[in-house]
Image: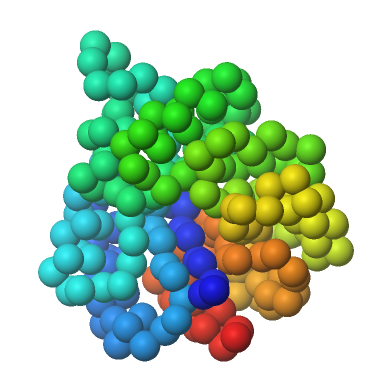
């Protein structure tokens, strides 16, 4: 299967910043079109429709995802975005990122509810987990193993530890795909490419610049 490079922009960029990013990507669109890498970009909600326009107008082979979804259906839930509202915009959704678990106190119960909503709306669910003992709920398509100590620190997890963790998760959940995330950049990615069960990467910081993002796609494209 093709390698996945998934960008998690977190709460970064305004419309002007994002336009600059897309302008740079568009210049290199031929490289994307000939690549076998599955590219997914998850901007903040505020930039979803601009991302969809860029992808559509320039026929970019990039899927668009969201970084969060409501645990409730459509209704009187001020500030929430329901899975059914996302479904026409995004194909994927990230659920349970450690930043949401930490800063917004997202519980396992809430995460389970979000997964159900997302699945019912036909979205592909990427669940972020922090260790080998994590519970992967029914409906999850992709698991992103992202140890907290490796996120945004510049120091990724030890590849051997990633391998052990993915082996343990795979033994319990053999039907999902696995990503590794945490300080993945063009200098660190190489050591993870050969790890069994890795289907790709969830990338934060290095996905914000078109140059490093494209570099990661280029590196993964050489992996067969
Ligand atoms: P990072 O973030 O690549 O900046 O470490 C990854 C993530 O949190 O998804």
In the rendered image, the vertical position of residue 76 relative to residue 93, given as above or below? above
Q: Where is residue 140 in the image (x, y as percent from the top left)?
A: 53, 43
Residue shown at 53%/27% (left/top)?
111
Looking at this rendering, what residue extends furthest in the top direction?
76
Of the 4 image quadrants, the one containing the N terminus is bottom right
Residue 212, can we see it?
A: no
Looking at this rendering, what residue extends furthest in the left direction?
57
Residue 201, can we see it?
A: yes
In the rendered image, the vertical position of residue 132 relative to residue 99, given as above or below? below
Colouring mode (rainbow / by chain / secondary structure / one colour): rainbow
Residue shown at 25%/57% (left/top)?
51
Locate residue 202: give its quadrant: bottom right
Locate residue 149: give its quadrant: top right
Locate residue 134: give its quadrant: top right
In the rendered image, the vertical position of residue 142 relative to residue 221, given as above or below? above
Residue shown at 52%/21% (left/top)?
110
Judge from the rendering whether residue 61 lies leftward or rightward of residue 156; answer left or right: left
């Amino acid at each position: 299967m093709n390698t996945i490079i998934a960008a998690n922009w977190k709460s970064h960029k305004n419309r002007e910043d994002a336009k600059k990013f897309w302008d740079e990507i568009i210049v290199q669109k031929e490289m994307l079109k000939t690549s076998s890498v599955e590219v997914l970009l998850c901007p903040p909600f505020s930039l979803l429709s601009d991302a969809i326009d860029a992808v559509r107008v320039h026929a970019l082979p990039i899927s668009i995802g969201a970084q969060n979804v409501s645990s409730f259906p459509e209704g009187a839930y001020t500030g929430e975005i329901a899975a059914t509202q996302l479904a026409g915009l995004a194909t994927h959704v990230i659920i349970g990122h450690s930043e949401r678990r930490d800063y917004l106190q997202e519980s396992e119960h809430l995460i389970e509810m979000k997964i159900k909503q997302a699945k019912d709306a036909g979205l592909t669910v990427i669940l972020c987990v922090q260790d080998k003992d994590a519970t992967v709920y029914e409906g999850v398509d992709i698991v992103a193993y992202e140890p907290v100590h490796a996120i945004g620190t510049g120091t990724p997890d030890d590849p051997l530890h990633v391998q052990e963790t993915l082996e343990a998760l795979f033994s319990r959940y053999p039907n999902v795909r696995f990503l590794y995330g945490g300080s993945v950049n063009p200098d660190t990615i190489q050591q993870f490419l050969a790890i069994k069960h890795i289907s790709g990467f969830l990338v934060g910081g290095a996905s914000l610049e078109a140059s490093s993002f494209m570099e990661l796609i280029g590196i993964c494209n050489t992996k067969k």
